[in-house]
Image: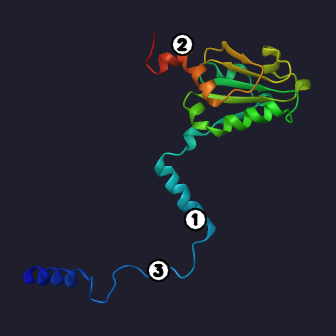
Amino acid sequence: MRSLIMLLTVAMLVSGMGSGGDPSPPSRVNPPSSAEVDAAQSAQSQEIGSPTAADELQILAASETTPEEFLWQARPVIVFADTAADPAFVAQIAELRRLPGELAERDVVVITDTEPAANSAWRSKLHPRGFSLVIIDKDGQIKQRKPQPWSVREISRAIDKFPLRREEIGRGG
């Protein structure tokens, strides 16, 4: 027993523990700045699997795009309203931003149109009245029209039933 204690003491002295010289760096006197805290939290959340740049949801104005731009590239989800202050529009955009990774995984791009007078290419093609949510598949086919906001879960489930999406994830039939 005595030789075991002696062996441990020698090992501690050799490693620097117990010699009075603490090998660890001195502790900070000043607390970390908010920028350092934000950077640390960002790094930690990326390690955990939070959304990355690839998971960011694209939200574009209807006046900046046309339906043809997304053919075979993405699944447009178009959110129409007569004004950006429409409570249904505000609720829908908030819901879409809540889980951007779920939509990005399904190649969704969100198109917003709150200017009926502008008569965008999207409005000309889809003829919405008031609030409307329209989901279009990569082949340009209109798959869903909804007169009220939908959750990301409902949108994701609908997309996962599309034949093209089923092929993408290998569930063909």
Label 2 vs label 3, nearer the camera: 3
Residue 103: quadrant of the picture:
top right
Dot label at residue 23: none
Other-residue count near label 2 (Cα within 10 Å), few / some / many at <14 / 14–19 / ≥20: few
Q: Viewed as shown, does residue 135 lie left or right of 63? A: left
Residue where numbered disc 2 is placed:
163
Residue 138: quadrant of the picture:
top right
Quadrant placement of the N terminus: bottom left
Instruction: Name above or below for residue 93 compared with residue 37.
Output: above
Instruction: Name above or below for residue 107 compared with residue 163.
Output: below
Question: Which residue lies most toward the front here?
Answer: 1
Dot label at residue 37: 1
> Please, what is the three-letter code of the amino acid marked with disc 3?
Ser
Give the SS element for disc 3: loop
First in sequence, mark 3 or 1: give its number: 3
> Please, what is the three-letter code of the amino acid marked with disc 2?
Pro
Residue drawn 47% across the image and 80% down it:
27
